[in-house]
Amino acid sequence: MERRSFVQGAGIAGVLAAGTAPAVVHAQANIRWRLTSGFPKALDTIYGAADTFAKKVKELSGGKFEISTHAAGELVPMPGLVDAVQNGTVEMGHTAPYYYFGKNDAFALGCAIPFGLNSRQMTAWQYDGNGLKLMREFYSNYGFISFPMGNTGAQMGGWYRKQIKTVADLKGLKFRVGGFAGKVTSRLGCVSQNIPGGEIYQALEKGTIDAAEWVGPYDDQKLGLNKVAPFYHYPGWWEGGPQLDLYVNQKAYDTLSAEYKAIIECAAAYAHTEMQAKYDARNPAALKQLVANGAKLVAFQKPVMDAAYKAAMDLYSEISASNPAFKKIYDDYSNFRRESNLWFRFTEARFDTFMQSAKL
Ligand code: CA
């Protein structure tokens, strides 16, 4: 008897009773889905996660589940991504959730908030804490389910034409900053602006803006900002570990077999790990080259960090007072952050501090 017809005839229960591997669960119609990215292809690490994901889904499904990936604007512009996934215009979107804080500030908690979780902590909160559960509960209001799919790690603090020495230096500073973080930098006196990546260089060169943050050495190097704004401050305290998410339209997801659902979960988890790995592997060489080409590395001074920290915590209290969805998630997030930092300060931080000052 041919295996396939035997399996179909016996049904899963019969197959399992007979001790035969349930190969039948692979049998499913070919499907083709579309994924819109919130990013341009030039951002190969972040956009690349969508390609990695689609490739893995195809491989794991034996070529039956195909997903085409599209750069921001090709099918829908980045700001319309959430609506497009919600409406089912596309089945999937890959983006930085904090871009959509205009809909609800709670979106930022699924990505990054100033003085939030680092990359390791964010993954821990999502996978083993309540993070994924709470974010999915929130996202269900928008008709989609989320999967962690990438993290950049702690970003840099950006490029400045003049060095930031004190909090007063931020007053009136025309600063390009992404997403939700502008709410905090504005409180410090910055004139916060959200300019697309492709327009940052010109704006800095012309003096339309005084400073701009983008990501970190690997991505920043491509923009050439070191030529027009040499002071490269760190750390990007507003993005200690921003997570990218895969959003999947819930109705479309519900039509999938358990096997295809598991494939999505595993392929997204693979892409999640790979993106952080790429940043960690590629940033060192890019940083060296930037410094060789004139970038002046300068740490933000503690009084600047302290003032920003206070502004951020005040903001979260205020949002929590008026936004129950934010409060519910932030209460859990902030508990996790406190406990995690209590642990990380011991062996992780001590080990890192020693190793990074050792002459290897
Ligand atoms: Ca950034």
Image (spheres, rainbow, N blue to C red):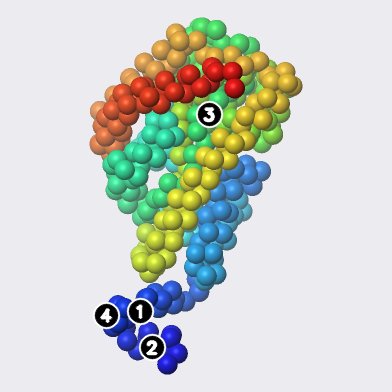
Residue bearing mark 2: 6
| Residue visible at 32% across and 29% down in the picture | 340
- Determine whether 68 is above or below 138 in the image: below
Mark 2 near mark 1, Cβ–Cβ under 8 Å?
yes
Q: Is residue 273 left or right of residue 103?
A: right
Amino acid at the residue labelled 3? Gln
Amino acid at the residue labelled 1? Thr
Mark 1 near mark 4, Cβ–Cβ under 8 Å?
no
Residue bearing mark 4: 17
Amino acid at the residue labelled 4? Ala
Mark 3 near mark 1, Cβ–Cβ under 8 Å?
no
Q: CA distance from mark 2 to mark 1?
A: 10 Å
Mark 4 near mark 2, Cβ–Cβ under 8 Å?
no
2 vs 3, front mark:
2
Residue bearing mark 1: 20
Q: CA distance from mark 4 to mark 2?
A: 13 Å
Residue bearing mark 3: 155
Q: Quadrant of residue 278?
A: top right
Badge 1 residue CB within 8 Å of ligand 1: no
4 vs 2, front mark:
4
Element carrying mark 2: helix
